[in-house]
Amino acid sequence: MWSKAVIWEKLQALFWALLALGVVLYGNGKQNLWTLASGEQVTKLFIWVGLVCWGLIALLFIYSHGSQLVTRCRGGPFEPLSSRSWIVQAGAGCFATAFVAFTAGLFPVYFILSPVIVLVVTFGGVMGLNFIPTFGLLKPLGPPDSEHAHAD
């Protein structure tokens, strides 16, 4: 049932999620990352800009997958995300802005390690999504089996 590729993918996701959790809980060794981000050492404007961008990315994700789910549940055709290129462009712009904003916001605390900290927490958060159960709700998002079936 589980292939080596699936097991390897889950192990990598677990590694990134645990690494991000360690960074968030460890912080700078004295305070956790949440306490540091809400403290006086960071530039709060940049942290807020990054959080707003992450919120916009979450809304884009919900919109794109929600509209696909509704379309598929109504029996409509599967539309790849490339047909809505504006979502990809907006998501990429928000991600780049969030990365720069969080790096600039955490720079007073972590200095040169700020980009690494931001990447680890971002990758860990994204990879941690692998462990959220969907209870089969997202199955309609994939192409139906009949489209991939070979004619005999």
Image (tube, rainbow, N blue to C red):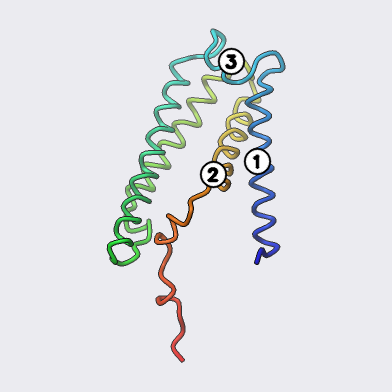
Residue underneath mark 1 = 16
**Which residue is label 2 attached to?**
129
85 or 147: nearer the viewer: 147
Using residue 98 as the reference point, say whether residue 67 is left or right of it.
left
Q: Which class describes the residues within 10 Å of circle 3: few (<14), some (14-19), or many (20+)?
A: some
The residue positioned 39% from the left and 27% from the top of the image is 52
Q: Position of residue 84 (x, y in %)?
A: 32, 54
Mark 2 vs mark 3: in front: 2
Q: Which type of secondary structure does the marked residue at label 2 adopt?
A: helix
* Picture quadrant where residue 51 is located: top left
Q: Amino acid at mark 2?
A: Leu
- Of badges 1 and 2, nearer the viewer stands 2
Determine the CA span between mark 2 and mark 3: 24 Å
Whichever of labels 1 and 2 marks the residue nearer the N terminus, that label is 1
| Residue at (63, 39) in percent of width and height | 17
Residue 74 figure quarter: bottom left
Tell me which residue sits at (57%, 10%) in the image: 41
Q: Earlier in the sequence, mark 3 or mark 1?
A: 1
* Residue carrying label 3: 36
Distance in Å between CA atoms under marks 3 and 1: 21 Å
At x 58%, y 44%, the residue is 127
Kindly report the distance in space between the C-alpha atoms of the residues bearing marks 1 and 2.
11 Å
* Amino acid bearing label 1: Trp
Upstream in sequence: badge 2 or badge 3: 3
Residue 40 location (% of width, % of height):
54, 7
